[in-house]
Image (cartoon, rainbow, N blue to C red):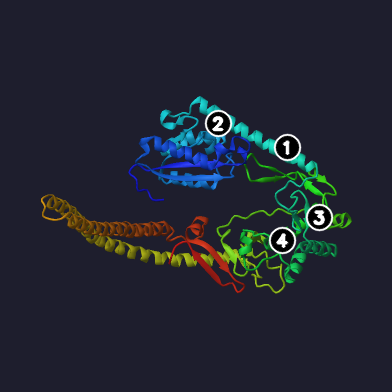
Amino acid sequence: MQNNYSKGIVAGYYRLSVEDDGIDTESNSILSQRTLVQKYITDHKEFAEYGFCEFYDDGYSGTTMDRPGMQELLAGIENNIIQCVIVKDISRFSRDYIELGTYMEHIFPFMRVRFIAITDHYDSNDYIGTVGIDIAFKSLLSDFYCKDVSDKVKSSLEARKKQGKYATGSVSFGYMKNKDNPQELLVVQEEAEVIKYIFSLSIAGNNLIEICKTLNDEGVKTPLEYKNSRKKQYRKELEQKHKYWQPSVVRTILTNETYTGSMVYNKTKQAGVGSKKKILKPRSEWKVFPRHHTAIIDKETFDRVQDKFLHNKEKGRIPFLHPLKGKVYCAYCNRCLRVAKLSKGRLSLYCANRKLESGGQCIQESIRNEWLKSVILKEIQLQLGQLVDMDIIMKETEAGYKSIKIKEKILLAKLEHGAEKCIQEKAYNLEKYHKGIITKEELFERRYRIMEQIEEIRKKQEELEERLCGCIEEVQNKQKGYKKLSVYYGFDALSTEMIEAFISRIVVDNQKNIDIFWTFSQ
C-alpha cells in the first residue's frame, strides 16, 4: 500500500458474521457500516488530508482475530501505514474482552494509532491510558453475548441430531447430502464399492500398509479425488502429481461407524469459543443414532474389523528435533521425509510412501542424517565464500548507483527549471492577451501546448524519482541480506538457525541426488 498523503491513512473496518443473525442485520450489513464510516469521515474535516482504505470480513466471528481482513489491517498498522481505525461499533472490531483491551489500552497507544467506534461515541483521543468504564462494560457484555450465542447454537444442533436430523457440515466418504433434503444422507455407489473392498481386504488379513499398497497399485482414486470429481476441492494434496492412499485414511474408514447406517455425533468439542481446533472426546461420550441412513457395511463385518483396532491402538510418534526437520522432500511424491531413530541415537530420513506402491520411485533406502548434514554444510560453506565476493561486488555497485543518483538529481533539477519556465511563459501569454498582442484563440492554443509540456516534464520527474528510490533501495536490501548470511562464515556445524537462513527446501531422489533451493537468488 502506497502512502501518498502528508498525514497518513485512515482505515475503515467492517465485519458481519452469523452472530448477527436476527439482530438488526440490515443495520449491521457491510454496506451499512461502510456508509456510516464514510459519512463520519466526510463530516469531520480533520480527515480531509488523510488517505483512506477499507478492510472487511464477511462470515467471520468476532471472538477471534484470525480473520483475513483483520490480518491485513493489523499488517498495515504494524508497518506504520495506518494511523487511524474507524468502526461502526466496538463489537465489529472484536467481541473478545481480553483481546480488545490489549489493543485499545496497549497496542494502539504504543503504535500511536487512533481508534474510533462511531455508535459507541468512543474516540481514543478523548482517553489517555485507559478505556472508559462504559466502553469496558459494553465490550464485556459483548464477550458474554458471544459465548451465550455459541452455547445456544450447540444446543440447537444437539436437539436436531437427537431427532435424527443430519446437522453436520462434512459428510463421510461414500455418502452425499440429498439436494432436496440436506438432513438426509444418500449412498454414492462408486465410493461405497471402494469402502466394501477396503473392508474385505481387512477381513482377508491385510494390515493398513498392505491395503494401501493394493489400492495404489490398482489405481483406485483417493477419497479426496472422488470428492473433487463431485465438487471442486481446494487442497494441497490435489496439486501433487502422485496421490497415495495413506494408512491413516484407511484406518479412519475401517473405524467409522457411519458405514453401518448409524449417525455418530458428539465426538469432538471446540477448544474454545471461536476456536477452529477440535478436541476428540472419549469414545464412551460419543452418541449414536441407529438406523439413520442406508448402511454400506453390515454390523457383523464392521465389528469383526474393530477387533484389530481395539487392542492395537495407533501409536503416537515422538517428534525428533533436528536442523533439517521439515526441509527434506522426496523428489517423486513431494512428501516431506520422516525421521527414524536408530541405535546409539543415530537418525535417518525416509519417505513414508515408499511401501505404499509396488515398484514406486520414491526413495527406497533411508538416508543417514549425518551424511546429509555434512553434504548440506559443505554446500552452505561454498555459498558463504561466494557471498563474501558478492558483498564486494555489491559495494562497488552501490558506489556506481550513487554516481548515477548525482547525475539524475542534476537532470531532475533541470526538469524542475523547465517546468518553472513553462509556468512563467503561461503567465506572459496571459499578459499579452490582456494587452491585445495575442487573440483569445492564440492564448488557449499556447496554454494547451504549455500544459502538455508541463505534463510531460512531470511524468519524467515521477519516473526519475521512482528509479532513484528503487535502485539504491534494491542494493541496500541485498546488502542487508548478505550481511545477515555472512554471520555464519567460519561455522563448522549445522544449526536450525543456519538452515532457516539459507535453505527453503531440499529435494532428494531415489539415486540420492540432492537439489537445494536457497532462500536467496544466486
The residue that mark 3 highlights is 259
Q: Is residue 351 left or right of residue 192?
A: left
At x 69% / y 45%, what residue is drawn? 279
Residue type, label 2:
Ser
Asked if residue 285 can be seen in this view, the reply is no
Tell me if residue 298 comes above or below residue 35 in the rendering. below
Q: In the rendered image, which quarter contains the C terminus? A: bottom left
Q: Is mark 1 on a helix, strand or loop?
A: helix
**What is the CA distance from the residue labelled 3 to the residue labelled 2?**
46 Å
At x 24% / y 60%, what residue is drawn? 408
Asked if residue 239 can be seen in this view, the reply is yes
The residue that mark 1 highlights is 155
Q: Is residue 422 left or right of residue 131?
A: left
Residue 142 in the image, given as x and y percentages of width and height: 58, 32
Q: What element carries label 2?
A: helix
Tell me if residue 223 comes above or below residue 113 in the rendering. below
Q: Return the residue nearer the eye: 454 or 497.
A: 454
Of pointers 4 and 3, the one earlier in the residue sequence: 4
The answer to whether the residue labelled 1 contacts the one labelled 4, judged by CB atoms less than 8 Å apart, is no
At x 44% / y 32%, what residue is drawn? 124
Of pointers 2 and 4, the one earlier in the residue sequence: 2
